[in-house]
Image (spheres, grey):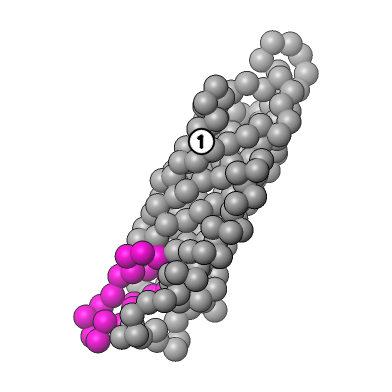
Amino acid sequence: MKNLLLFPAIILFYANTFAQTSSNEVTPADQYQRAITIQPFSPVTGSLKFNYNQVLQKNVTLDLGVGIIGPNVSDDYINNKGVSLKAGAKLYFNPDYYSDGLKKYSDFQGGYFEPEVAVVYFIAPSEYEQGKDAYVGSALLLNVGKQKVVGKRVLLDYWIGAGYGVNIFEEGYSGDYKHEYLRFNELGIALTCGFSVGILTN
């Protein structure tokens, strides 16, 4: 848990660093400041996930996510029920520009690095007897990804990440898949990846 407490310090450090960008970068006044996205493939793994992004400052956006564990289009994890939450900050290290004076096309466009904290709670059918297993866990994840704006309003986002996860409460459930990330129980290593699509808004 001590490792997770480093998250606010990491965010403050990188936000300050990435804000100091080249003076010739121009941001159009009418850029959208928020984005709402859905992860369309998340029901394949037993949940329905949404994300909310908001511009904090130049090259830094807030990323909040919620997952409803239960909706499922496969036979895996069909009876799991719960919720997942995550919060992070996207720090753009490779913003995309168009050629007219190096103006940035969108605040949500380009490659990024994202420190993220995820928390998950769910109940699942017991593997060994009748009843329910319960699980609560958290992970600090370091993601890299890229966002692309299509048609000035549609946002595509894909990412992959790794970090360290902890089991806060575990009653019977021993699976590696935690719905928000994959955690190898013996090592504590956590992995994640995803794809989302959504719209930009003011």
Tell me the amino acid under the disc marked 1. Answer: Ala
Instruction: Please give the range of residues in magenta.
Output: 92-109
> Could you tell me residue 9's position as x and y percent?
58, 59
> Could you tell me residue 64's position as x and y percent?
59, 58
Above or below for 1 versus 38: above
Asked which quadrant contains residue 36, the reply is bottom right
Above or below for 87 versus 81: below
Q: Residue furthest bottom?
A: 29
Considering depth in this image, is 14 or 179 the residue closer to the camera? 14
Above or below for 41 versus 97: above
Determine if residue 75 is in view.
Answer: no
Which residue does the image show at 50% across and 41% down from the upper left? 163
Considering depth in this image, is 78 or 98 the residue closer to the camera? 98
Secondary element type, mark 1: strand
Asked which quadrant contains residue 8, the reply is bottom right
Q: Which residue is mark 1?
A: 190
